[in-house]
Image (spheres, rainbow, N blue to C red):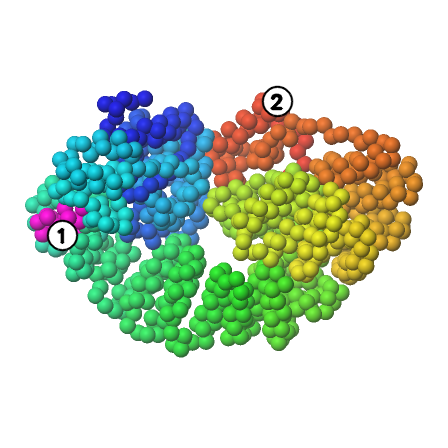
Amino acid sequence: MRTPKETPSRLLGRDDEVRCLDGVISAAREGRGGAVVLRGEAGIGKSALLDHVREAASGFGVLDASGSEFETELPFAALHQLCVPLLDRLPELAPGRRAALEVAFGLAGGTPDVLQIGLATLDLLAAAATEKPLLCLVDDAHWLDEASAKVIAFLGRRLAADPIAMVCAAREPGAGRVLNELPALVIGGLPDAEARALLAAESVDDKVRERLLAEACGNPLALLELPKAGGFALPEVASVPSAIEASFGRRVAGLPPDARLLLVVASADPTGEPRLMWAAARQLALDVTTAGAAAEASGLVSLSTRVRFCHPLARSAVYLTADAAERQAVHLALAAVTDAQADPDRRVWHLAQAGTGPDDEVAAELERSASRARSRGGVAAAAAFLERAAALSLDPKLRAQRSLAAGQAKFDAGAVDAAAELLSTVETELLDSSELARADLLRGRLAFVRNAENDGPEFVLSAARRMSGAAARECVLDAFEMGLTVGRASGVLDVVVREARSMPAEPDVLNALVVLSTEGHRAAVPLLRRAFTGDSLRWTGHPALATMLAGELWDPEVHHAVTAWLMKTGREAGSPFVLRLGLAQTAIMAVHAGDFGVASSAIAEEEAVADALGVAPLPYPRLHLAAMRGSREELLEQTEHATRAAARVAGLLVANAHWASAVLHNALGDYPAALTAARQAVEPGDLYLAGISLPELVEAAMRCGEEKSALTALEDLTERTSAAGTEWGLGVTASARALVSGDEEDYRAAVSHLEVTTAKPYLARAHLLYGEWLRRAGRRVDAREQLRTAHDLLSGMGMRAFAARAAQELRATGEVARSRSAEAADELTVQERHIARLVATGATSKEVAARLFLSPRTVDAHLRNVFRKMGINSRRQLKELSWSWEPGRAAGPPRARRR
């Protein structure tokens, strides 16, 4: 530990922070990389700690990047800074990865894929780290462009097994929020003793010193900077950073005019390239030699291989102290010296800032820049260009069109409030019919995201009325899907159905949904099946809706076909949304087939994709798995987590949670609680969930003595499953009917139907119900056979609560159930199990890494844990173990014979 004398003044009072950062560097030297984000207000000492890390990382290769207030809209700008020293290694990457980075950095055409760019950057850093450890320093991360921030967050979560350390510095606001999931080191103010020691070297009046200490709140830059204003005593300001910025402003104001204008040029150019700054200075006819010397002598800026301000607040102070005419002249000069071919977007942005009023020529250039930005995946940049283009448009019609386009781009970028504000400025009377439809569609999507009144579908229907043919039907189907998401109880679906019935009938999914809503399952099932057959794949535009319809058909074959398409399309097209949906459906199918290992693996992979995107994982498969496993604590945890993560889709989420609760409480024998949950799941009438909740309602109602409720639910279930005609549906219905009728033939029919399906949980429960009925009928020997079969199936699948219920019933017949012995694989984490399964099929570490968005080193680290926990020492031994899942396929293909 440093003594006070050994501690540099810039690190005074930062011993704990220094120890933490030294630990990050030491771990990276040993191959255990990691990331940390320094968080704190401006001037608190983050940059000083970054400088310390740079000094401490002797023998490391150092990569630098810095967010810029003026480049927050330019996609991958900061990532490009970080990777520039490594670009000569691009040929070492696999072709696909190399192409991803080339697209991101504008070296090749194409649409960027953030996940692939993240993986490519990880490969690039890992390749460089084979020669020596790497240190990545990212300053002003709150000003990172969104695309770079996502990639840097992706990298930060995946360095655990690589000799790479990443340290970022950010204030709380801004794009730094994307980095929130990374470990944070919050930098607070200095303690009083250290603050006094830091201020001791400054010659200030005692009273001023006490005022400074009180109002600086331990901010080191405030303590060092404010006394330079000639014993300045802090005024009443909103914050310490504001006072520091004001102090920098006073220093700027005291400089010669040429030096001050040169600093304005430097502050307005986010690239930090001296060549551009000097060229712009000459364009402004400045005496560059004298001005440069005076600017550097001020201590505000360093002019060497890069232009660097002493602090971001100094840069903003310089820019803000310039008057409007000076800023316009500076931007005009920078536009003149920026290469129109190599950097057209930055050039037109300077032109836009230099304008004093509307300019259709600049607006048209901005619109072209927006198109280029969108093609590179820079939706936020496209929105910014379009917004500025609208503001500079003289033609009212063009201004309305560009404002609408900017609003759509803002919405696509996730800036919902900004999109709504832009949309409110659009003069709709200047739009044609197709543009009005686009405005209504955007208004509907905004309302769906923002409003609790669920009026989004109404606006989407308004858009549909302005369209015709297939486009209109697609709009109505969008509204239908919104209505399903918020739940049938909202009443939205009734409005959508009325609109759809007014349109000419077509043999498509929309027509089938209308028939289902108005005439019931018997009339609709043939139409729904037609939508899933043939080569037309009419459902692929609405894959989430297709998964619900497959469940409504009680048809695992259809569900498998939909899931297989999702998995294939998601992987081949590189679509994270489609892939995540496919993995979630793989997990749900596996849960209902009783293969919880498959389900856990698919959940782990979906979680890896979600983590790579920086979003919450899909909650539904976890709820289904927790319910079938029979763990009250796990289900409660998953329900709470899902509620926090997916509040916007409350209709579907709540229905899933109620179904899961009904299953769990039936397993535990808490039938009143199961009955309440099942009724709540069935009542909204949601696709799929209402249907699979009916058997739970029948069982709970009969156990509670509410035979009338059970009969009503059985009639509804029978209509659904008899129309579908699958073995799964017929078997589940026979089992429910047996509870009501007490007829042994129904129990036998249930087992007969279900034993030819992959629906093992339902087969096991049919044996359990049959055995319970036999025991109550006094046929203990026959009961034991059914209960023993049920217990073996349930315990083998890991359905603990139902297995305990079967064991209790067996004890009542005089037989003790065999307990399941623990397996070594049970000790594996979900991710370790998934990696083990993949490696057992022959996948290399590199292939597994690509699939799970990890580095090969991280995969190898997980494998070492697997070997240790399972008592093996080679991949060959891993392959010899029994793994029930073939990766890349859903649990199946299942059998679902129809009668």
Extreme residue toward the front, this view: 207
Q: Is residue 173 above or below residue 504?
A: above
| Residue 871 image label | 2
Magenta stretch contains residue 248: yes
Circle 1 SS class: helix
Magenta stretch contains residue 262: yes
Residue that mark 1 sits on: 261
Magenta region, main secondary structure: helix
Circle 2 SS class: loop
Q: Is residue 580 shown to the viewer in this render?
A: no
**In which quadrant of the rendered view does residue 346 lie?**
bottom left
* Relative side of 125 to 296, left or right: right
505 or 217: which is nearer to us? 217
User: Which residue is painted at 64% across and 52% down in the image?
Assistant: 656
Give how far across and how far down residue 81 sits, in percent: 31, 43
Q: Earlier in the sequence, mark 2 or mark 1?
A: 1
User: Which residue is painted at 18% across and 44% down in the image?
Assistant: 233
Write down the region rendered in magenta: 247-265
User: Which residue is painted at 23% across and 50% down in the image?
Assistant: 236
Q: Is residue 829 shown to the viewer in this render?
A: yes
Name the amino acid type tagged 1.
Leu
Name the amino acid type tagged 2.
Gly
134 or 621: which is nearer to us? 621
Mark 2–mark 1 Cα distance, whole angstroms, equals 70 Å
* Relative side of 472 to 211, left or right: right
Q: Is residue 512 above or below residue 633?
A: below
Give how far across and how far down residue 414 sits, in percent: 43, 56
